Amino acid sequence: MAEKRVSRKNSKWKKLFWSLLAIDLFIIIVLLVLIFWPIPEAKIAHQHHVDETKSSEFIIRTTRENLDELINAYLDKLLQDSKYQYSVSLEDDVHLMGELPVFSTKVPLSLHLEPIAQKNGDVVLKQKSISIGLLELPNKKIMEYMKKYLPMPEWVTINPKKAEIYVAVTQMKIKSNFHVRVEHLDLEANNIAIKLKVPYRKLGIDPIRFGQ
């Protein structure tokens, strides 16, 4: 009987030993798996690139007096090497004054235009009245002389057939690369609003940081 009891005790100890050994081996295997299991590649966050044309827009309100000075300062530079001079006066309308060559002589030119802001930011100057000295010439003919002899910026087009001057303000080339468009133009009320589009790059601002 004593031998059987000893045998049972030994059998229990063996079972406990093997159970503990199995548990220890299982824990070791789990730890090894966790340590050496390949880590999935982390997704690298790519910088959010924004179009380099990203910009901010500002509305600038001014008066016809300030705009008058700016226009004529520009014309002074444009016409400094020209034979024929002209200037612009912003009153209740746009008054263009200058001179044109007619019959081998220079005669004074006076042209009144109504400015009309376009939806795209440009301006159309519609002819209201036109005269060239004391000569009686068809309006279309006078505007043809203007187109032929008066130097104009490349973004200004004289159209004798429509009796108008198209001012493509949005096509102006500015050294700062700012973009300009006319939002509102009422000379009689002295109410002028211009939208200025400023690219971030021109301000030294990285657009990547502003693409959130």
Image: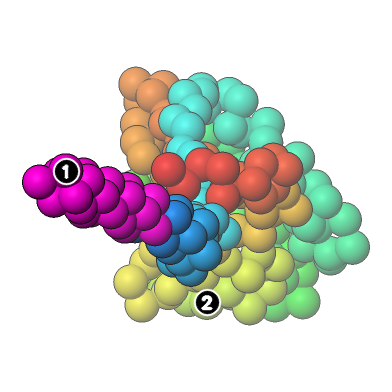
Near mark 1 (Cα within 10 A), the count class, few <14, some 14-19 or many ≥20, is: few
Query: What kind of residue is marked 2?
Result: Glu
Secondary structure beneath disc 1? helix
- At x 16%, y 43%, the residue is 2
Provide the residue designation for mark 1. Answer: 2
Which callout, 1 or 2, points at the residue further toward the start of the chain? 1
Q: Residue furthest front?
A: 1
- Residue 104 quadrant: bottom right
Q: Is residue 72 above or below residue 191?
A: below
190 is within the stretch colored magenta: no
Query: Would you say residue 1 is visible in this rendering?
Result: yes
Query: Would you say residue 129 is visible in this rendering?
Result: no
Q: Is residue 199 left or right of residue 125?
A: right
Q: Position of residue 212 (x, y in %)?
A: 43, 43
Q: Position of residue 98 (x, y in %)?
A: 67, 52
- Residue 146 quadrant: bottom right
17 is within the stretch colored magenta: yes
Nearer to us in this view, 77 or 180: 180
Give the Cα separation between the discs numbered 1 and 2: 135 Å
Q: Tell me the magenta residue range.
A: 1-25
